[in-house]
Amino acid sequence: MKPGIKARILSGADFMSFSQSAGSSFLPLLSRIVLGTAFLFAGWYHCFAQVDFSDAELTRIDAMKSSASAPVQVNQVAWEEGTDADLSDDPETPRAAAASSNARPAVYRIAMDLSDWGVKSGLVPLAWGIVVFQMIAGALVLLGLFTRLWGFLLACLLGATFAFSSVRANEMFSMNPFDWRGEPAQFHEMYFQLAGFVLAFGLALTGSGVLALDKLVFGERVKVAAQPPASGS
């Protein structure tokens, strides 16, 4: 074989090796950054943010809380009474006080979504479990610890959310697909779920990639197989 042809073949092999290494190392890192930050921020928001609800939504929230244990109800009532007292101490801002009186933890948005999807009991505890899971899973995926496990669990969560919201509640597949874009909120929600599922399932298959705690904790578990020796020619 001529030296020039052999050099070009080696150059092509090196490029393939580089592209395969980038695909197995850097693309999982990008997937971890996107998924990790999305779920970490979403979980944090639903855990700690206070949002305003309408009177009808507050009625639904009160019905959800009625199934909670008595100590939790007493603490919640005491907190609400203390909040109302604090707001009444500032008579100069009645509009702000009225708006704040409808504020509740954002986790109740998740509880109401579950109710709309047909879940009948345990709405508030289940909603809290989901948002805490989102926050923990997002942080650990971002750090790259137990990436395959969390990727699989997030894929399951996104798949279930897709089935309940896009397929069942929004009835996207009963519509003409060419009309999907006419419902922008449902369209973006559905494709976010699908894109997140693909990224999460990819992490479950490929692992964490570079810059991950998995590499420090478990080390390199997969070694690149040695290439067969070139035939003499």
Image (cartoon, rainbow, N blue to C red):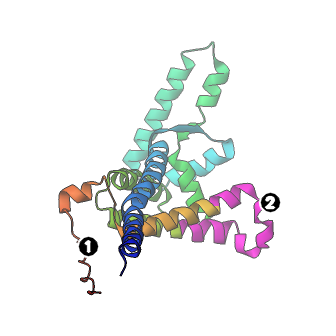
SS type, badge 1: loop
Question: Pointer 2: what residue?
Answer: 182
Which secondary structure is most common in the magenta stretch? helix
What amino acid is labelled 1 in the image?
Val
Label 1 Cα crowd, 10 Å radius (few <14 / some 14-19 / many 20+): few
Q: Would you identify the image quadrant in which residue 146 lies? A: bottom left
Residue 185 percent coordinates (x, y): 70, 55
Q: Which residue is at a point 58% across and 55% down the rendered structure image? A: 112
Q: Looking at the picture, how far across and down is residue 76, in whole percent?
A: 45, 40
Give 177 or 214, whichever is nearer the viewer: 214
Amino acid type, label 2: Gly
Q: Quadrant of residue 164?
A: bottom right
In the picture, the quarter occupied by the N terminus is: bottom left
Q: Is residue 193 magenta?
A: no
Eye-nearest disc, 1 or 2 = 1
Find the magenta span and give its range: 160-189
Q: Residue at x 49, y 48 (%)?
A: 42
Q: Which residue is mark 1?
A: 224
